Amino acid sequence: MGLDGVEIVMALEEGFGVTISDGEARECATPGSLIDLIFAKLRASNERVCVSQRAFYLLRKGLKGTLGVARRNVTLDTDIRSFVAGRPDREVWNDLKNAVQARSWPKLERPLWLVGGIWILSILTFCGFFAAGHLLTSVVCTVLVAFLGTRLTRPYGTLIPRRYTRVRELVPFVATSDAISWTRDQVATLVKKTVIEILGLKDGVYREDAHFVKDLGIE
């Protein structure tokens, strides 16, 4: 599977909160077969109900249960942090995820001092080797320090991510909840949007029966 194919699978895994194995991905030769695979993994429904609307109601219920937020105080622009009231972000974040039963959920952010420490260590590494006249070594070691620092400190995220503090920003994640059912048409709409965006297709080129390799150009 080419890079475009991998990107499509990763985007759909995040969008629907499901896992698609390499073997399953290889078996999906067309968008239609990919839609059927995802639909089979989700809680299926024949009702045509707006998934985003269901997700909003579920999130509002979750906020009431975990933070005691009154329904009337929850809008799409509500900032969740305004209701945390001294509780640890990690506890609130995990409780809210469990309350809405989301399969996909944003990861906690690392504190600014920790991120800043990685940057400072990377800069010092570069300056140290550069001053010694080792330009290539300084670049390689700086990249390595930054990579390892970022990778090893992932478990130390303790803050609600700034990109996902408002209700509207969490709705797509709540839409992956086990408590929400999808129709095949709704799955098909999101798959179509994802494939068209990643491959840069014109709307008329996309078909559910189009072959990913022969018709849509995925290598």
Image (spheres, helix red, strand yellow):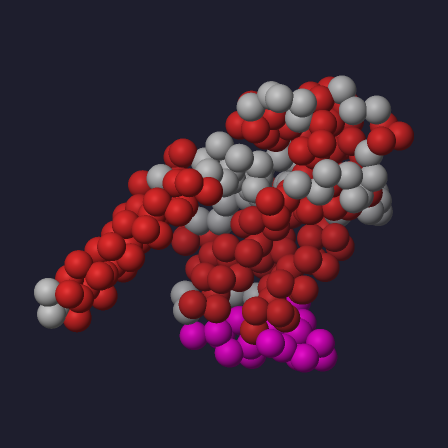
- Check the image and report above or below for 154 versus 38: above
Residue 113 in picture, x, y percent from top left: 42, 40
Q: Is residue 95 visible?
A: no
Q: How many marks?
A: 0
Residue 80 horizontal side relative to residue 31, left or right? right
Instruction: Identify the residue at image location x=41%, y=45%.
Output: 115
Instruction: Identify the residue at image location x=76%, y=20%.
Output: 68
Magenta-colored span:
200-219
Residue 7 horizontal side relative to residue 51, left or right? left
Q: Is residue 159 visible?
A: yes
Q: Nearer the viewer, residue 180 or 149?
A: 149
Residue 174 in picture, x, y percent from top left: 68, 39
Residue 14 in picture, x, y percent from top left: 56, 49
Q: Nearer the viewer, residue 114 or 15?
A: 114
Instruction: Identify the residue at image location x=57%, y=36%.
Output: 160
Residue 45 horizontal side relative to residue 147, left or right? right
